[in-house]
Image: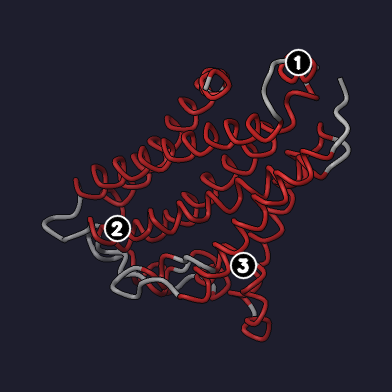
Amino acid sequence: MNIFLREMKAYRKSIIFWSIGIIFLLASGMAKYKATASNGEINELFAEMPKSFQAIVGSGAFDLSKASGYFGLLVLYLFLMATIHAAMLGASIIAKEERDKTAEFIFAKPISRTSVILYKLLSALMNVLIFNVVSWISSVLFVGKYSNGEQVNGDIAIVMVGMFILQLLFLVIGTAIASVSKNTKKAASYSTGILLLTFILSIAIDLNEKIDSLKYLSPFKYFEAKNIMYGGGFDIAFVTISFVLIITLTFVTFLFYNKRDLHV
């Protein structure tokens, strides 16, 4: 359990900074709603925007004169921040012992590699959960402040559940890459590179319906706010794919890290 506490201590400043960032994103975003969108003219403004821009932000799916609709626009950026945090955390928490030359210290203790990885993953999971809870509470507070009686908590809840699944997915993408990669210093770069490629692919799919079949390759298409809010719920196929990938990549993390030659 000391390893769990050690990792929580190591990443405490990081999760504080990320939490401040997510609070700022939601506070400033909803403040802009109050200043520009609450009068109802925002829908007409976005309707005049290029179709490509509307496709990217998903504005056509939301009533931007409502707090819940404007929150739907912010979800894309919320998801992006959450997944970048998770991918970088997953890669660094596995790779840092070799990167920081502390592998000899930690693995000299009477504890198996499997236990080390388990405690590291539990610590990463706790950090991801903290990020999600901060996002959830902040969303309820800031969106609720401008909702004018609109029931928004249900929409926020389903978005946060979808975000948590995405966080877990990119977390284990990061841990798997760090376990497989021979160059641990680049594990975080590889993880964020994959994240950005899938994010760009999701935008490309929105811009070109002919490549819609590629949506299964981009996790950002799995839990889009425009699809899961307003009673749409989750697509069982996307949920199944997500959990299969999470389980598989977790297995890959344990398997390859137990076999790798550590550079001390």
User: Image point 52% across, 22% down: which residue?
Assistant: 1
**Given the current orientation, which residue lies at the most extreme left position?**
149
Q: Between tags 3 and 1, which lies in front?
A: 1
Dot 2 or dot 3, earlier in sequence: 2
**Given the current orientation, which residue lies at the most extreme bottom position?**
210
Residue designated by label 1: 108
CA gap between label 1 and label 2 equals 59 Å
Q: Which mark is residue 37?
A: 2
Q: Position of residue 254 (x, y in %)?
A: 70, 43
User: Image point 79% across, 44% down: which residue?
Assistant: 256
Judging from the image, what secondary structure is the residue with disc 1 in?
loop
For this view, does 42 lie left or right of residue 262? left
Judging from the image, what secondary structure is the residue with disc 3 in?
helix
* Kind of residue sitting beneath label 2: Ala
Whether 188 is drawn above or below 49: the answer is above
Q: Position of residue 215 (x, y in %)?
A: 62, 74
Q: Quadrant of residue 162?
A: bottom left
CA gap between label 3 and label 1 equals 45 Å
Q: Position of residue 121 (x, y in %)?
A: 58, 37
Mark 3: few, some, or many residues within 10 Å (few <14, many ≥20)? many
Residue designated by label 3: 202
